[in-house]
Image (spheres, coloured by chain):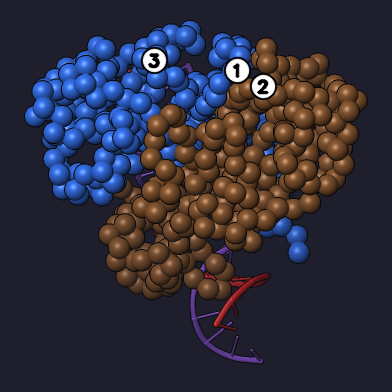
Chain colours: A blue, B brown, C red, D purple
Amino acid sequence: MADPMYRQIAEDLREQIESGDLRPGAQLPTEIELREHYGNASRNTVRDAIKWLTTRGLVVTQPGRGTFVVETITPFIVRLHTPLESKTFEEAVRQQGREPSVSQPRVEVQNADADVARELQIEKGSTVVIRHQQRFIDHSPSSLQTSYYPMEFVQLGAVALIQATDIPTGASNYVADMLGIAQVGYRDRLLVRSPNAGEIRFFRLLNTGTELVVGTHRTAYGHGHKPIRYTVTVYPADRNHFVIDFDEVPPLEDLVKDL
Amino acid sequence: MADPMYRQIAEDLREQIESGDLRPGAQLPTEIELREHYGNASRNTVRDAIKWLTTRGLVVTQPGRGTFVVETITPFIVRLHTPLESKTFEEAVRQQGREPSVSQPRVEVQNADADVARELQIEKGSTVVIRHQQRFIDHSPSSLQTSYYPMEFVQLGAVALIQATDIPTGASNYVADMLGIAQVGYRDRLLVRSPNAGEIRFFRLLNTGTELVVGTHRTAYGHGHKPIRYTVTVYPADRNHFVIDFDEVPPLEDLVKDL
DNA sequence: CCGTATTTGTTCGTATGTATT
DNA sequence: CAATACATACGAACAAATACG
C-alpha cells in the first residue's frame, strides 16, 4: 500500500530540506502554491503534510507570514563535570566568548515535596529554603535554576540563604564557609521532558509540542554522604550541548572552536 | 480572545490526565463520544484536540482501537561518569537488577566523516574501523553503540578490532593491552535529537514525532590528549535517566531503589 | 494610521479507507 | 462478516496575523 498523499508531500519537502535545496530560514511555498504543485491536493492535505514536518521540528509556521525551514542554532556547551574548584556561571560563559547575566534571586520558604525530601534526605514536609535564579547568555534566556537547602542551615547561621540578594562567592561556598560543611562530591541526573507553562514563557518557546527541556538535577554532598544542596537547572534542549569530562582531556576551547 | 475550541477540549482532557482522573493506559472517550460531550463539536475539531495531546506526548492513538493515555515507563539509569576501572555494560545492568544481552558486533571499514575526523584528530577521509553493537535490557532494545577507531591501530597489531566477534575484555582494554596506549580520560557530549529511520525501527518507536533519542558521544584519550576511540551510544529519551557522579556520593543503589 | 492583499488558523460538513474487535 | 474506531481526503467559509502601499 502506498503512503498517504500527505506523507508523500511531507517526504518530498523533507528531502528538499535535508538536501539543502531549502536552506535554513528559507520560506516554503505557500499552502496554495503547494496545493497547485502537488496535483491540486486539498489545502487541508497540504496542511497535514506541513503539520507532519512541524511535529518533527523541521519547519515552523507563522500566521500571516508563512512556513519556514528551522534555523540551526549554535549550541552553548554546558559543562556538567567541572572540578570542585569550579567556575561560576559567569566565568564558564565568558570562556566560550559569550556575555552572561543573571536575575536577582527569588527566595521562597516551603515544605519539601517527595523529590526534594528524597534528595536532601529529610522528612517530606520539612521546611526548605528555595532560591530561584534566571540566567541569560547574550541577553537571551539560557537556563532556570532552582536550589533547595535545608532550613536547618539558616538556623545554624547561614542567614544569607533567605535573603533575596546574590551571594557573589556562590551559595555553596557560603554554606561551606559559614557552617564548615565542605562539598566533597555530587551526583547529576539528567532527564528530558516537555517544558511547563513558565518555562515556555521564559525561554520564549513556540509551544509547537516539539520543544523540549533538559533538567539537570544536582545533589551535592558533604562528608559522610550528607546532602548539602539540591539544584535543578532547566535548559532548552535545542540550544545546548552537555559535556562531561573525566581526567585528562583536551581543553574545552578546542571543542567550542570546532563546534 | 478565548482559546480556540480544540485547545479548550485539549486542555480539559490534559487536566483529567494530569489530575489522575484518566490514569496511564486508560482509554479516552471515542471521537464520537467526545464530539457529543463538547457541544456537538465537529469530529475534526475533536481530532485537532487529540492531535494537540499526541504531539505533546500525553496520549497515543491506535486505529481501530482508540486513544489511550501514555504508559509511564520506569527509567533505566545510564551512568555516564563511571571511574576508569569501569563496569562493563553487563555488570552495570545487573547492578540494577535487570537482564542484559548484546548482539554480535557488526564491523565496517570506512572513511572518516567530519565528525569522526574531528574527534579522532585525523584527516577527514582517513580510514577508520567502525564497530556497531545492539544492546538489550530485559530483552527490550536498550541502546545502539557505534565505536570508531583509527585504522592505524589495526596495522599496529590490534587486529581483533576488524573481526566481527565480541572482545570479552572490552575493545578499549584490548587496544590498551596490544598497543600500550592506556586510556587516561574521556569527554562525553550529550545531545537530544529526533531518531532516524534505523533507530525508530530498532527501538520500536511509534514515529509520532514526539519520540526522541539522546546521543552520548564519548571520546577517550590516551596520554598527551591523543584520541583513542570515539563512541556514539544512542538511547531512547523516554526510558532512560543519565547520572554523572563526582567524587564522594552515596551508592547508586539508593537512587535506583527510590526511583 | 488605514485599508487591502496575502497567508496561516479554526471550524464545519462529508465521504471513504483501514485496522481492530 | 459486521460493528466500531481511527485515518485520509476533499471542499468551504470565516477569523486572525502579517506585510505593504
- The picture places residue A251, in percent across and down from the top left corner, at 57, 12
Q: How many marks?
A: 3
Residue B195 shows in this picture: no
User: How far apart are the alpha carbons under marks 2 and 1?
Assistant: 6 Å
Q: Residues within 10 Å of mark 3 (few under 14, many from 20)?
A: few
Chain where mark 3 sits: A
Chain where mark 2 sits: B
Both on one chain, marks 3 and 2?
no
Q: Residue at x 53, y 43 (%)?
A: B78
Q: Residues within 10 Å of mark 2 (few under 14, many from 20)?
A: many
Q: Of the residues shown, which amino acid type is indicated by label 2? A: Tyr
Q: Of the residues shown, which amino acid type is indicated by label 3? A: Glu
Question: In the rendered image of this protein, does residue A215 appear above or below residue B136?
Answer: above
The circle drawn on residue B221 is 2
Q: Of the residues shown, which amino acid type is indicated by label 1? A: Val
Nearest the eye: B179 or B204: B179
The circle drawn on residue A249 is 1
Tell me: A253 left or right of D14. Answer: right
The circle drawn on residue A85 is 3
